Image (spheres, helix red, strand yellow):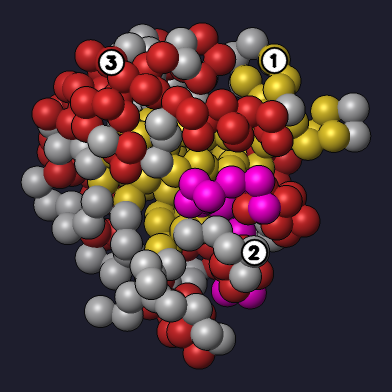
Amino acid sequence: MLKKRIIPALLIKGSSIVKSIKFDEHRIVGDFISTSKVFSKRFADEMFILDIDAYKNENINYANIFEISKFCNMPLTVGGGIKKFEHAKKLFENGADKVVIRTSYFENKNIISDIAKYYGNQSVIVCMDIKLNNNRLMMYDNNSSNFLDPFNEIKNIENLGAGEILINFVDLDGTMNGFDINFLNKMNDKTKIPLIAMGGCGSKKDFLEAFNTGVEAVAAGSIFFWIGETIISIKEYLYKNGVNVRLN
């Protein structure tokens, strides 16, 4: 049985690590390289580097990814600004192990199958930004304000060849109020693709509740910056509560 994963999610804005609340109110919490080095030593199972300006600015900082890859002792997943296959290819050449596709799902779905065919399904994650719209949780495109039914799209994502789906709760981002457990349960019932939960984690119990829905991983940021929990303390708690995690 595969072990469940704890993933620090680092949001990049320029040369800084930032934290947001509901995709807004970005606060600088550290330097990009030094913060990445800290998390590389903390028993994480993977690291997310998500550049929130790269798509808008049409500028992926490949040099930063290469720098991180030299000391990162875990799989490195990179998102932001990936509009075509060549962008993903260059990220892999500079040390990324996986890429996250978000906005391009709305604009160029074929990029997912292109990456999966060349590098394997495990190399590409599709991010579903989930936001409330007319009293329904919908898949949201932050750039165009388009909304799609996530329960319909999940089959399309499977068929395109994605290896994992990142469920990112926009309205819970940075609130530390926990995940939408009911939604995670429904999504797990709809697919066999591994799911990653992100957006809202504020306690060790939130990790446990998410894993109890069947997700394979939890990505978080605020709990590490504002609460002070460590990855090892969270893993010890999860292990004591029956979750199969890597402790060393």
Image coordinates of residue 218 in percent, x first then y, are 50, 58
Q: Amino acid at mark 1?
A: Asn
Please tell me which residue lies in front, 151 or 171: 151
Q: Secondary structure at mark 1?
A: strand
Q: Secondary structure at mark 2?
A: loop
Q: Secondary structure at mark 3?
A: helix
Quarter of the image holding residue 178?
bottom right
Q: Earlier in the sequence, mark 2 or mark 3?
A: 3
Which residue is tagged 2? 213
* The stretch drawn in magenta includes residue 201: yes
Q: Does 128 sit left or right of 140 as displayed? A: left
Judge depth for marks 1 and 3 and give the one in front. 3
Q: Residues within 10 Å of mark 2 (few under 14, many from 20)?
A: some
Please tell me which residue lies in front, 128 or 116: 116
Q: Residue at x 62, y 21 (%)?
A: 142
Q: Amino acid at mark 3?
A: Phe
Can residue 11 be seen by looking at this rendering? yes
Q: Does 71 sit left or right of 52 as displayed? A: left
Image coordinates of residue 147 in percent, x first then y, are 72, 20
Compared to residue 126, the image places residue 248 above or below, namely below
Q: Residue at x 56, y 26 (%)?
A: 156
Which residue is tagged 3? 85
Q: Earlier in the sequence, mark 2 or mark 1?
A: 1
Q: How far, Cα to Cα, is label 2 from label 3?
A: 33 Å
Compared to residue 226, the image places residue 166 above or below, namely above
Can residue 61 be seen by looking at this rendering? no
Q: Does 97 sit left or right of 196 as displayed? A: left
Image coordinates of residue 123 in percent, x first then y, are 29, 38
Q: Residue at x 32, y 62 (%)?
A: 45
Magenta residues, as a range?
189-206
Q: Residue at x 71, y 22 (%)?
A: 148
Which residue is tagged 1? 146
